[in-house]
Image (cartoon, rainbow, N blue to C red):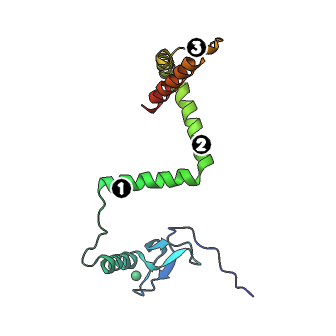
């Protein structure tokens, strides 16, 4: 039969004494870090012993260096960007709906800017339309067909050159 343990004390409650597994000193429960896996939800060693443990583990990993090597601002920025990217890829739907809400809110708050952007887009489209060669109907006369075809080819070339630029 399983033995039922008493309910764990909430984190950082004072007044419950606990003996550290490392220094064997009885200390108050507030001197122990929270640890979800433990039955009493507290670490098995006290805070000073734990920081000592972390420090010696770092020394073992990095030699005489006590602190982990510092990352440059650019490295930190790259890390942030990569984490954000992987989050977006893992939560595509959530990211999309978030973005939609954010854009809607922006449009609501900045109606003048949205209007201006639309005007600029329309002007750009108009300018591009003016650059395009005018459409010419296919001639009914047979002798003109080959020159019409040549014109079409030239038009296609110009249109695609414009696209590629
Ligand atoms: Zn201790």
Instruction: Identify the mark at residue 64; answer none if there is no mark.
Output: none
Whole-percent x, y for residue 108 in the image: 56, 26
Looking at the image, which is closer to me, 30 or 121?
121
Whole-percent x, y for residue 5 in the image: 66, 80
Whole-percent x, y for residue 110 in the image: 50, 24
Instruction: Identify the mark at residue 96; answer none if there is no mark.
Output: 2
How would you rate the neighbour count of disc 1 (Cα within 10 Å): few for under 14, some for 14-19, many for 20 or more? few
Placement of 103 over or under 38, stated as above or below: above
Placement of 99 over or under 114, stated as above or below: below
**Residue at the right extreme of this rendering:** 1
N-terminal-most mark, 2 or 3: 2
N-terminal-most mark, 1 or 2: 1
**Residue at the front extreme of this rendering:** 143
Label 2 and label 3: CA atoms lie apart by: 44 Å
Q: Is residue 136 left or right of residue 163?
A: right
Looking at the image, which is closer to me, 12 or 97?
97
| Whether residue 118 is visible | yes
Q: Is residue 158 left or right of residue 2?
A: left
Mark 2 residue element:
helix
Say which residue label 3 marks. Answer: 136
How would you rate the neighbour count of disc 3 (Cα within 10 Å): few for under 14, some for 14-19, many for 20 or more? few
Instruction: Identify the mark at residue 76; answer none if there is no mark.
Output: 1
| Residue displayed at 52% across by 30% down | 106
| Residue displayed at 72% across by 85% down | 2
Whole-percent x, y for residue 116 in the image: 47, 19
Looking at the image, which is closer to me, 121 or 143?
143
N-terminal-most mark, 3 or 1: 1
How would you rate the neighbour count of disc 2 (Cα within 10 Å): few for under 14, some for 14-19, many for 20 or more? few
Cβ(mark 2) to ligand 1 < 8 Å? no
Placement of 3 over or under 79, stated as above or below: below
Circle nearer the viewer, 3 or 1: 3
Mark 1 residue element:
helix
């Amino acid at each position: 039969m399983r033995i039922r343990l008493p309910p764990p004390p909430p984190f950082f409650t004072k007044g419950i004494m606990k003996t550290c597994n490392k220094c064997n000193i009885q200390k108050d429960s507030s001197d122990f870090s929270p640890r979800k896996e433990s039955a009493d939800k507290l670490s098995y060693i006290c805070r000073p012993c734990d920081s000592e443990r972390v420090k010696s583990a770092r020394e073992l990993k990095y030699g005489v260096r006590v602190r982990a090597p510092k990352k440059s601002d650019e490295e930190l920025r790259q890390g942030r960007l990569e984490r954000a990217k992987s989050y977006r890829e893992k939560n595509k739907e959530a990211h999309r709906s978030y973005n939609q809400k954010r854009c809607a809110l922006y449009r609501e708050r900045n109606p003048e800017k949205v209007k201006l952007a639309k005007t600029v887009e329309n002007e750009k489209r108009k300018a591009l339309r003016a650059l395009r060669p005018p459409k010419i109907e296919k001639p009914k006369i047979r002798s003109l067909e080959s020159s019409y075809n040549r014109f079409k080819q030239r038009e296609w070339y110009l249109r695609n050159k414009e696209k590629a630029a």
